[in-house]
């Protein structure tokens, strides 16, 4: 079975949608439509109408060709910023992760790679404009040094947003993930000063929070295991209290004693 593309050509069902590229004129028209919707979303964001902004960013995503990973990453990162404002931490994490995944498909993350010298602007909650540069088909297939700098800049923004979302959501795994993101950000020497302070403060405050969450979750897990064990042993007139784990100080191993 075949399906029609937007330019009227036939494409087989086995063909991957991500591999289908629009004609240059149609791509430019779709991107222009996406940029117009993004501009509208930016206005909603500036006026603190974050739910409406998300709706407009979603429309911009629908108009944007699905192979334009950079433009998609910018929109996803902006959506993450909206979710942070709405304190929807889980949705913020998901959107920021989608942005990072799109950027990784363009240029894999490199630890320690700096942002372009002279870049300014807040990484945390600011909205990023999509550049409207016109390039020929050959340049579209290449990743220029300038675009790599842009990619790294957007990656930093998405990392900041995901790290904050994970930190706010809490839990052992999320807090550990937030620490990993902040460590990656700490390798970017050209972060704006205010964001460097956020990163440094987070890296100082996260370890005790991670340890506390770890101990709590392990305690909860052991409590559930004990409850399960008591259910199994009850028909025999026993409980987990009849068993003690004794550590061998010489070997560091444990043995089980029955009381």
Image (cartoon, rainbow, N blue to C red):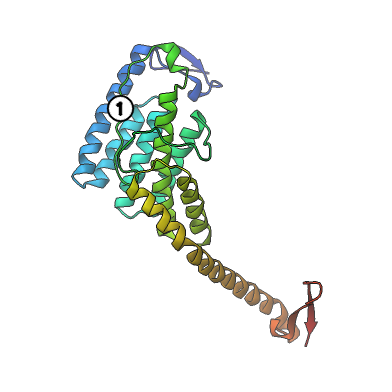
Q: Residue at x 45, y 37 (%)?
A: 114
Image position of 175 with respect to 244: above or below: above
Image position of 127 with respect to 221: above or below: above
At which x and y percent is residue 226?
A: 65, 76
For numbered disc 1, what is the local secondary structure? helix
Q: Is residue 4 visible?
A: no
Q: How many marks?
A: 1
Q: Where is the C terminus found, in terms of image quarters?
A: bottom right
Q: Residue at x 29, y 51 (%)?
A: 85
Occupied quadrant, residue 128:
top left
At which x and y percent is residue 248?
A: 79, 77
Q: What residue occupies the far left of the structure in this picture?
A: 47
Judging depth in this view, the residue of 121 and 29 nearest the camera is: 121
Occupied quadrant, residue 145:
top left
At which x and y percent is residue 37?
A: 26, 31
Q: Residue at x 39, y 36 (%)?
A: 154
The answer to whether 170 appears left or right of 132 in the picture is: right
Q: Residues within 10 Å of mark 1 (few under 14, many from 20)?
A: many
Q: Provide the residue designation for mark 1.
A: 34
The answer to whether 168 appears left or right of 38 in the picture is: right
The answer to whether 218 appears left or right of 56 in the picture is: right
Image position of 63 with respect to 259: above or below: above
Q: Residue at x 62, y 73 (%)?
A: 222
At which x and y percent is residue 192?
A: 34, 44
Judging depth in this view, the residue of 87 and 9 nearest the camera is: 87
Image position of 12 with respect to 78: above or below: above
Q: Is residue 29 visible?
A: yes
């Amino acid at each position: 079975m075949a399906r029609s593309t937007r330019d009227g050509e036939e494409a087989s069902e086995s063909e991957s949608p991500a591999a289908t590229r629009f004609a240059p004129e149609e791509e430019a028209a779709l991107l222009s439509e996406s940029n117009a919707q993004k501009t509208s979303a930016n206005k909603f964001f500036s006026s603190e109408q974050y739910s409406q902004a998300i709706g407009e960013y979603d429309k911009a995503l629908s108009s944007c060709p699905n192979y334009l990973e950079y433009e998609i990453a910018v929109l996803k990162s902006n959506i993450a910023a909206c979710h942070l404002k709405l304190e929807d931490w889980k949705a913020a994490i998901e959107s920021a992760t989608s942005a990072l995944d799109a950027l990784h498909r363009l240029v894999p993350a490199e630890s320690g790679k700096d942002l372009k010298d002279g870049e300014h602007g807040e990484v945390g909650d600011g909205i990023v404009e999509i550049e409207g540069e016109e390039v020929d088909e050959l340049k579209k297939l290449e990743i220029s040094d300038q675009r790599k700098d842009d990619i790294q800049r957007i990656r930093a923004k998405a990392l900041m947003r995901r790290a904050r979302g994970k930190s706010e959501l809490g839990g052992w795994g999320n807090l550990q993930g937030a620490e990993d993101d902040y460590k990656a950000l700490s390798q970017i020497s050209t972060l704006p000063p205010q964001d460097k302070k956020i990163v440094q403060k987070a890296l100082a405050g996260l370890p005790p929070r991670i340890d506390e969450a770890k101990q709590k979750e392990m305690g909860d897990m052991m409590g559930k295991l004990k409850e399960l064990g008591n259910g199994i042993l009850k028909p025999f007139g026993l409980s987990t209290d009849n068993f003690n784990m004794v550590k061998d100080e010489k070997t560091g191993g444990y043995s089980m004693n029955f009381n």
